Image (tube, rainbow, N blue to C red):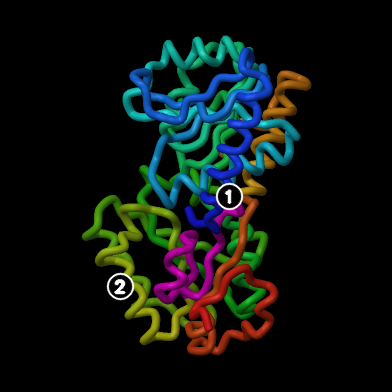
Amino acid sequence: MVGVSNTGWFSSKLIAVSLSLALLMPDTVAFAQTENARGFQLAFNTSNNPIAVIYPDIAEPYRSVFAQIIAGIEDKTNMRAVGYAVGSNVDSDELKNALSRQDAKVVIALGRQGMKIASTLDRNIGVVVGGVITAPDQDSRNFPLISMSPDPALLFARLKQLSPGMRRVFTVYDPQQNDWLIQRAKAAAGKQGLELVAYEARDLRSAVGRYQEIFAAADSRQDALWLPQDSTTVEDGSVLPLVLQESWGRSLLVFSSSFGHVKRGVLFSLYPDNAKLGRHLAEMALAFLDSGDYGERGMILLREVMTAINLRTAKHLGVNASRQQDFDMAFPDE
């Protein structure tokens, strides 16, 4: 996950709000900014609030990402969120008691740790999840989970915009991680006039073999390679350098679901717009408060995205990327 850091703004704003409210309403405001024995921090608590946010107590750069998502939640709800930063040693019972005292009716859970805690809450509390790539089916069937994996429909639409002659997209994936994603991607590809050719690989060795098959068969005039978010088949240390080297030599267009790959040489990627994601999560939480229904459940692909492009790669491939205003970030940064 990548975004523009606003940690300084967030921290200073938080401290200022905390101090002013503590002076004005000492009997109704509780603040705790340091780790305690319960394994969670109460980020801010200005009054009873039906929406609470649980997120991992984690270092940068991810801390800033969660801060941006929370800012989006607050923007949509027009209220100061009650945030709980949870560590690995969190006391679930104490956290449940804190939520009860807060009279929380719905929890927005961010990250895998937040989702893990939220799944243990009482059934009368609504749960909306974001900030994770995927989750076991049993963890997501009863509530909405917005994945950090960009919707392939958006990726394929951008591909056709940049290179209209594309007809086929290859990808390599681990079915244990991304079978759900590939099923949706095949349908999305068809709507763009593309054929998605997906190879399964359950380990690093077989993934390398699959890429070798793709490079032997691909026609750079009409074929492209998609790199999903997959720790098995898109391993950064050895697989990615191989893919970049081979694709460059063959002028094969490669695009990715991971922001960091653009700087390293893939043509483009889509990455989360954290503030917009926060607003979407808040919309679902508000819908639950209003009607008891989220609107949709299960895995939801990320559509709140921004676009990054590698201009050097575009020039090498003969792709017209001169309209830089269509992209949120471009590399090299000239």
286 in the magenta segment: no
Q: CA distance from mark 1 to mark 2?
A: 37 Å
Specify the segment rendered in magenta: 254-273
> x%, y% of residue 96?
49, 13
Which mark identifies residue 322?
none
Q: Amino acid at mark 1?
A: Trp
Residue ID for mark 1: 9
Task: Name the residue at 54% across, 27% down.
Answer: 141
**Along the line of sight, which residue is nearer the eye, 60 or 16?**
16
Under circle 1, the secondary element is: helix
Q: Of marks 1 and 2, which one's residue comes earlier in the chain?
A: 1
Task: Name the residue at 65% across, 65% down.
Answer: 157
**Along the line of sight, which residue is nearer the eye, 66 or 163?**
66
Q: Which mark lies nearer to you, 1 or 2?
A: 1
- Relative to 146, residue 182 above or below: below
Q: Is residue 71 left or right of residue 257?
A: right
Residue 186 visible? The answer is no
> x%, y% of residue 277?
63, 45
Task: Name the residue at 68% across, 41% down.
Answer: 280
Q: Quadrant of residue 209?
A: bottom left
Which mark identifies residue 241?
2
Under circle 2, the secondary element is: helix
Residue 191 visible? The answer is yes
